[in-house]
Every structure is written in C-alpha cells, then in structure tokens.
Image (cartoon, helix red, strand yellow):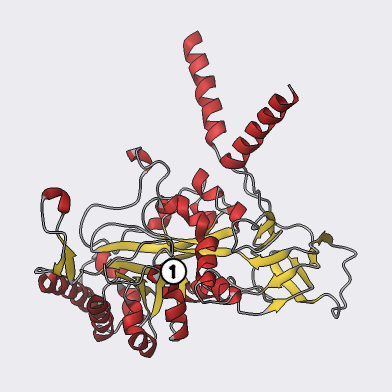
Amino acid sequence: MKNIKYIAILLLSISIGFAQQTPAPKQSKDIAIMGATAHIGNGTVIENSLITFSDGKITNIGDARTMKISTSNMDVIDASGKHVYPGFIVANGTLGLVEVDAVKASNDLSELGTFNPHIRSIIAYNAESKIVESMRPNGVLLGQVVPRGGRITGTSSIVQYDAWNWEDAAIKTDDGIHMNWPSSFSRGRWWLGEDPALKPNKNYKKQVNELKQYVIEAKTHNISSKNPRHLPFEAMKGLFDGSKRLYINVNDQKSITDAVNFAKENGINNITIVGAYEAEKVANFLKQNNVSVFLQRVHSRPNNNDDDYDLPYKLAKNLVDAGVLVALEPSGQMERMNSRNLPFYAGTTVAHGLTKEQALQLITQNPAKILGIDNMYGTLETGKSATLFISEGDALDMRTNLVSEAFIDGRNVSLETHQTELWKRYSKKLEEEQKD
C-alpha cells in the first residue's frame, strides 16, 4: 500500500512536470502599445505607432504623433525602438498531432486507408503539446492542423496556440480536404539496387483514374438526398459547394497542370497547390485559374541535377512576381520542430529578392487569405483580432527576433517553454561555476 502511494505521487509529479502552463485568461483591461514600428502585414509600415485593443480586438491603430486617444485607463506598453507584427501562421502543419515520433501512442498523424476525407485532424489535436508552446517565442501563434497519409488524407482545421483543449483552440474547423496527387515521374529505390534516375511513372494514369472515379462518385452521391449515409463522400460536399478548399500536394509541372484541370472539371474552384516545386513553370496558368500556393520549405536542396543551386530560396520571389498568391509551409523532416523557423524561412526569401514586407505577407496576410481567416487574422487592422507580438528587432532575422510580449485574441500569452526553462537552469549553473 505504501509503495502504491509513492507511485501515485511520482506519477502525479511527472504529469505536472509534463503539462503545458495554464492558458492566458481573457483580456480584462484595455491595452495600448506605443512607439513601436508596426508591420501591418499587408505591406504597410507605421514607424511610430499607437495600437490599442479591447476585448481581444484592435480598436485603434495609426501614427502615435497624430492620433488623439486617451490611454489613461489602459495598460500602456512602451515599445519604443521595437517592432510589432501580426501573429505568424503555419500553413500545412502537423503541430499537435505528434508529440514523440518514436512513441506510437503519441502519434495521430495519419489514418489507415487510401481515401479518408472524413478524418478530422482537429479532434486529435493536442493543445497541451510542449512542441506547440515552443512556437510562441518566435511569434508563431496560429496554424493549420493537417492529417497525412493515403491518397486523400483528411480534413484540416485552424487553431491558435494557447488553449486548454482542441475545442478552445479551434478558430476555424474543417476548412478543407487534403489530397496527395500521383507523381508523373518517379525514382527507383537506390537502397534496393533500383535505378535512381528520374523516369515516367508507369502507374500514373491508373492512379489518376482511381482518384477521378472516387471524386465523381462523391459528387454524384451528394447530388441526391435519397442515398444512404456515406461519411467519406459527405465530407467532400464542401468541395463542390465552395465551402471547403481542396489542398493538392503535388510538385512536378505536368502533375500540377493535371491536378488543377481535374479539380476544375469537377466543379472544384477553391484550390491550393501544396509543395509546388515546379510551380514557377506554370505560374501564369495558376494565376489565370486563381490557384494559390503553399510553397515547400525554403531551406531545402534542389530536387534535380540541372536546377539552380538556389532555386528553393528564390521560388517564392518568382511566384510572387508572377502574381500568384503564395504562403510558406514547413512540411518535411522534423516538420513540427521546424515550424518555429517559419519567420526565418521568410527571411531567406528576402535575401533572394523579396522585400521584407513581401516576405512578411508569406506568413501573415497570404496564409490568412488562403485559409479563409483573413476577416480576423493576418494583418493589424481595426476590428480584427489582437493576435500580435512585440519583437526587439527584425522578426525575420533569427539574430534579432527576441519576442518580449505576445497576444492571442488580446490575451497576454506565456513565452515560457521547456527550452527557456532549461536555458535558465543551465545559465544559473554556469554563473555559479564562474563565481567559483
């Protein structure tokens, strides 16, 4: 009995140690941020700004030298010499679906089966993930939670990164369906002795026809109300009536063109290409068809031997110049951890042609537009959510993006994480050793 008591105490202490800190309470007093350089998110910059917000929404924003607003009853934050930005948005992310890759019980990334449009990622989202809370110190405050696996992977939702549970976290549920389009080219598996050279995918036509047949069946099912319940088909109804967006993971030129034509032929008009490595080759086609892009991780290597060595770095610039609506996404190896590097991916695009404000749009206004949350998030404007942060320097530069305050819907959220706790712990140890 005594041992059982000790075990219970040990388990309780472990659970407390691993729990995320309590989410911030609702904003109770009006707040004013004065003197900062405000980066609105739409290309506009206000050098000496005054921003006020109440009940989680921005009430005023403008030049502090010309605005006549009493701040006597507000909590005033002097941000002179600092910068204010809209909260950064992770598109096509998997934060909260996996905690430890090697622990199967903590992995809700994918479902068995080929066609899973009815699988909702939001109900598997872990709001208390330690990885999720580690995003906030870099200004990453919102994200799309996307399931992986299969030909049609499931339905995504958008969340904010300071919540008790998935219900509290959700700001838009079931925003779209995600699809992995077949590749028209493939490489042999070199580790099995196969030819690694790029060659046509001999199964491409068959794989595309299977996908087309499934979508046609879903469309036909949703036309009639007399059909028996079919949850996967019913989940796709929003694609045909325009209430959901189709996110197509596809990279090569031919496949991108085929995928867009396929969607249009089936009456699907809200389309976003994800990955889009060769999208610049069909940029005019994408613009003409009003197709947006979630561009693959900027910090990547070229895919092909004859590609420019810096192609992944300048893809965003090339697509923006062509008039395509572009946002950045972090998928790939260690994608959950690397989501915190989102602002630095945007910073890399500045070094390869974009202005800083254009790069900022790739992780604020543009993803908000594509995800359908731009009425409240993505830019600093009167009437929109007070989801923003204050940085001591340029938020797109890892050397200067030191976040001092962050707000989600007006709530002053914690910037403490497991990493900051360890930093303080070992900094103190180092200081004591230096004294000795």
Query: Nearest the camera: 35 or 272?
Result: 35
Q: Whole-percent x and y of residue 28? A: 76, 57
Query: Nearest the camera: 325 or 144?
Result: 325
Q: Is residue 164 visible?
A: no
Q: Considering the numbered disc 1 on the image, is that residue within a helix, a strand or a loop?
A: helix
Q: Can you tell which quarter of the image residue 347 is in?
A: bottom right
Name the side, left or right, on which 21 lies relative to 330.
right
Amino acid type shown at disc 1: Tyr
Q: Is 42 situated above or below 275?
A: below
State the residue position of label 1: 313
Name the side, left or right, on which 168 lies relative to 291.
right
Q: Whole-percent x and y of residue 168? A: 55, 55
Q: Residue at x 89, y 71 (%)?
A: 70
Q: Whole-percent x and y of residue 395? A: 62, 62
Q: Whole-percent x and y of residue 314? A: 44, 73
Q: Quadrant of the C terminus?
A: top right
Q: Is 435 situated above or below 408?
A: above
User: Residue farthest to the bottom?
Assistant: 288
